[in-house]
Image (tube, rainbow, N blue to C red):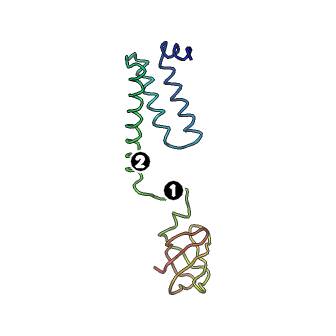
Amino acid sequence: MDWLIDLYSAQPFWIWLAIGVALLAIEVSMTTEWLLWPAAAAGVVAVLTALGLPLGWTGELIVFALLTVVFTVLARRLIKRINPGDAADINDRDSRLVGHRAQVVQAFAEGRGRVFISGSEWAAEIEGEAPMVGESVVVESVSGSRLKVRVG
């Protein structure tokens, strides 16, 4: 343990840099999106110690904690501004179908039929009046591999 104290006394920059790199490595491997900001805060503290600011171990921990909170809050606000609400993931094809038009390719019988949308054919359900083959319907929701549609 004395070697760690000696290393910190000699150059606290390396300790903070190691903490930042370790947090960043964990973030990259686990993609939690929570460890990125403490890693950035550790990097800033490393730079501050390299510049020779006489913060001491306690002061560095306080700066690290404050920067972690500030970075996290600012990042969450930025993310909310860029992606307000729960917008569908661009890679989630099923969620992107909601609200789009589909064409009936197999007649509906007892509320079930088939529609064509986004380059593929889907099983579909409808309540009420069944549309004819070739008519257009709107996707209301996706449940597994089945679409719920309505005339519209």
Relative horizontal placement of residue 116, taking residue 81 as reference (left or right) = right
Q: Amino acid at mark 1?
A: Asp
Q: In this picture, is 62 found above or below 51?
A: below
All told, the count of numbered labels is 2
Residue in view at x 49 percent, y 37 percent:
36
Relative horizontal placement of residue 45, taking residue 31 as reference (left or right) = left
Along the line of sight, the residue nearer the viewer: 54 or 114: 54
Q: Along the polypeptide, which appears first: circle 2 or circle 1?
A: 2
Query: Which of the 4 quarters of the picture holds residue 85?
Result: bottom left
Secondary structure state at the residue bearing disc 2: helix
Along the line of sight, the residue nearer the viewer: 108 or 55: 55
Q: In this picture, is 36 found above or below 110?
A: above
Residue in view at x 50 percent, y 24 percent:
17
Relative horizontal placement of residue 77, taking residue 125 as reference (left or right) = left
Name the spot of residue 55 as percent of width and height, x first: 38, 19
Q: In this picture, is 54 found above or below 145?
A: above
Q: Which residue is mark 2?
A: 79
Residue in view at x 46 percent, y 32 percent:
40
State which quarter of the image contains the N terminus: top right
Tag 2–tag 1 contact (CB < 8 Å): no
Q: Which residue is mark 1?
A: 89
Q: Which mark is residue 140?
A: none
